[in-house]
Image (cartoon, helix red, strand yellow):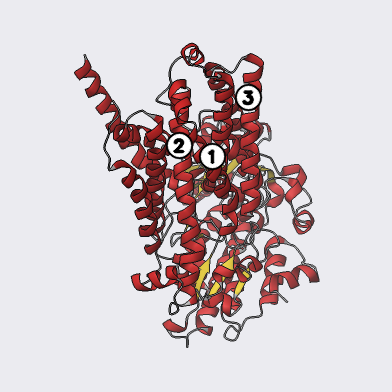
Amino acid sequence: MIRKDRSVPWILVLLPVSAFILALFLGRYGIHILDTVRVLLGLDGPSDVFRALILRVRLPRVLAAACVGANLAVVGAAFQGLFRNPLVDSRILGVSSGAAFGAALALLFTSQGMIVQTSAFIFALVAIALVMLVGVRFGSSTLVLVIGGILVGALFNSLLGLIKYVADPLSTLPAITYWLLGSLNATQWSDLPPLLTITGVGLPFFALLRWRLNLLTVSDTEAMAMGIRVRLIRTVIVAVGTLLVAASVALAGTIGWIGLVIPHVARVWVGPDYGRLIPASAALGAATLILLDTLARTAMPSEIPLGVLTGLIGVPAFFILFLRFLRTRGEAQ
Amino acid sequence: MTKLWIAVSLVFLCALTGLAQSETTVIDQSGRSVTIPLPVEILVSVHGIGTYYVYALGAGDRLAIAYYIGVKTLSSASESMLRWEPRLAEILSYGDPNIEEMVASGAQLVIADGSQHEAVAEQLRDLGIPVILYRAETPEELKEAVVLTAAFLGSGAQAQADAFIADYDRMVNAIATDLESLAENERARVLFVGTSLTKVISGEMYQTHLIEGAGGISVTRELFGSWNEVNLEQILLWDPEIIIIPPYGLIQPADILDNPDWQSLNAVQNHRVYRMPRIIAPMDTPVPESLLGIAWLARTFYPDYVSFDLAEEIVGFYANYYQFTLTDEELARMTGQ
C-alpha cells in the first residue's frame, strides 16, 4: 500500500536540514548560540577559534555524516529490491570488507587520512571488480552476485585478519581497530570532494532509476517481459551503489545497520514505491547519521565509535520492525 | 646426646637449605602462587613489557624466545636495538605464542601478560611449565614486577632489583624536591596523545602516572579505560600547555604545530609539542626505562627547575641495567640536544 500523505515531501527536506542545523550548534566546546549564528552568517564578532570550530571542524563533519547516512540508506534500499531480500544491506557485495582491508593496509604504513581513504576506496572497487568477474563468468543473476559477494567479503576479511596479526600492537593495531568501528572524527574539508561528487551523482541516479527499481523487485522474467534489460540495469545499479558505499566507507569506516534498518523504516513511512522510498531513505539516513554522530562527539569527553552507536540503535529498531512484520503477517493470516 | 641433636639439626637445616635453593614459590601479579624450580636458565617471554624486566636484571642471555621486544619483526628493529641485543634475530619470534615452540625451546619458565595470556598459561601449566603473569600499570606495580622477576633469577638479580627501586625512588623524590616551590596552578597541564592526533591516554594508564611523577597534570586524567578517541573541540577545551607524543607511531610534532586547526592551543602557540625519544624500550610504558621517561618528562616540563643531569642519568641507566653504551648521536637524541 502506497501512502498518499502530502506532508511527506516537506518532512523529507525538513528532517535532514533540521538535524544539520542542530548539529552545527552542538559540540563539546561551548559556543553561544548567537556566536554560532554570527559565524554561519559570516558576521564579525566571534573569535577565530569559534570560526575554526564551526566552519572547519563541525561543518565538514556534519556534511560528511549527511552524505554517508544518505548513501548507505539509499544503497541498502536499492539492494534490498535488487536482490529481493529484506535482510540485505550495502555490505552484501563485499565492498565494505574490501575497503576495510584497504584502510588497514594503508594504516600499516601511514596515518595520513587521504592515503588511507584512497586505499580503502581502491580496494572497495577491487572487491566489486572481483564480484563482477564472478558475475561475468557465471551469469549476473542475483544468486551469483550474492555468492560472489560472500566469497570476496570472506577473502578480504581473512586478509584483514592477517593485517591485524602483523600490525604493531602499540601503534598500528589500535588505529586499525578504531577505523573498523567507524568514525567521522578526523573529517576535514579536504576529505570531502570525492564523497560530495559521488553522492551528488549517485543519489540522483537512484532517484531517476526509481521505476526500474520497482520492476526489478519482481522476477527477472517478468521484468524482461516489461522491457527491462535486467542484466545491464542490475550491473549499473551495483556499480553506482558500490561507488556510493566505497566513498562513504573510505571516509567513515565500517558503519553497520544504517543500510539495513533505515530502508525498512522508510518503507513503513512512505511505502515500497521506489519513487518515494529513495528520497525517504536518503532523508532518514542523513538525519539519523547526523544525530548519531552528534551524540558520538558530544555525549562524553571521548568519542563514541559510530559503528557502536548505529548497532545500539539499529538492533532494537530492527527488532521492533520485525515484531511489526510478525503482527502484520498474523493479521493477514 | 646434645651434640647428636645439634648434628641432626644441622643436617636437617642443610637439607632444608638445599630444598630452598632447588625451588622457590612466588605470588605473581594475577595473585596465583607459582612454584619455580631453580635455577632458571632457559626463559621464554610472551610479554613484551616483561621481557625488559629480564634484561634490566641482567638475565637477557637466558631468554630462548621472546615474542615482542619493542618490535614485532626484525626488519623494524633500529640499529641501536640490534647493537644492544646481537641475539635479536635468534630469539625474536613472530606472531602469537606457540605452545609447541615454547616446549621445544626447553623453557623452564614462561613470563606472560596477565591481561591476555591466561589461556596460554593454563596450557603451559598442564605441560608442567610454570608461568608468571604480570599486571603492571602503576609505578608500584612496576617495582613489584621487577622484584617478582628477581625472585626467580638469583641473588645477582635481587641486588639489581633493589638498585632499580632505589634509583626509581631517588629520581621521583629528586623531582618532587626540585618542584616543591611550584604551586598547583603552576604545574604543567599536559596532553599525552597516541598514535593519532586525537587518541589520548586515560587516567588509568601508566603514562598518567609518569606525568604526575614528573610534576605535571594530565588533562585527560578523568578518562577511563585504555586509549581514548577524543575530538578537537574537547582538546581545545582542555587547552594543554604541553603536548607529548609517544616514541612509537607515526605522529611528529610538526603534524600538530603545522595543523591550522590546532593553532589556538596554548601548547602550539608556545611551541611546546614534543615526541619522546627512544633507544630500546618505549619509555612511556611500564618498563624499567620509564625511570628515564619520568626524568625526560620532568626536564621537558620544567627545564629551569630540575637539577639532575639528564644525560648522566641516561648514560648511567643504560650502563647499569642494559650493559649498553650509547653513541654520542643516541645520547643527543635522548636528551634532545
Chain for numbered disc 1: A
Residue A202 — which label? 1
Residue bearing the label numbered 2: A74
Mark nearest the camera among 3 and 1 is 1
The x and y percentages for residue A315 are 34, 36
Check if mark 3 and mark 1 are on a common chain.
Answer: yes
Q: Amino acid at mark 2?
A: Val
Residue B309 drawn at (x, y percent): 66, 80
* Residue name at image x 52 percent, y 36 percent: A205
Label 1 close to label 2 by CB (< 8 Å):
yes
First-in-chain label (3 vs 1): 3
Amino acid at the residue labelled 3: Met
Where does the image place residue B31, in percent across and percent down from the top left?
42, 47
Nearest-to-viewer mark from 3 and 2: 2
Left or right: A269 with respect to A286?
left
Q: Which label was assigned to residue A132? A: 3
C-alpha distance separating marks 3 and 2: 21 Å
Question: Quick one: quadrant of the N terminus of chain A?
Answer: top left
Q: Is residue B69 in sight in this rendering?
A: yes
**Crowd class of label 2 (few under 14; some 14 to 19; many from 20; radius 10 Å):** many
Q: CA distance from mark 1 to mark 2?
A: 9 Å
Say which element carries label 2: helix
What separation in Å lies between label 3 and label 1 (alpha carbons)?
19 Å
Residue visible at 76% across and 57% down? Answer: B84
Q: How far across and down, in percent of the image, does residue A151 sit?
A: 58, 23
Callout 1, which amino acid?
Gly
**Where on the picture, by quarter, is residue B110?**
top right
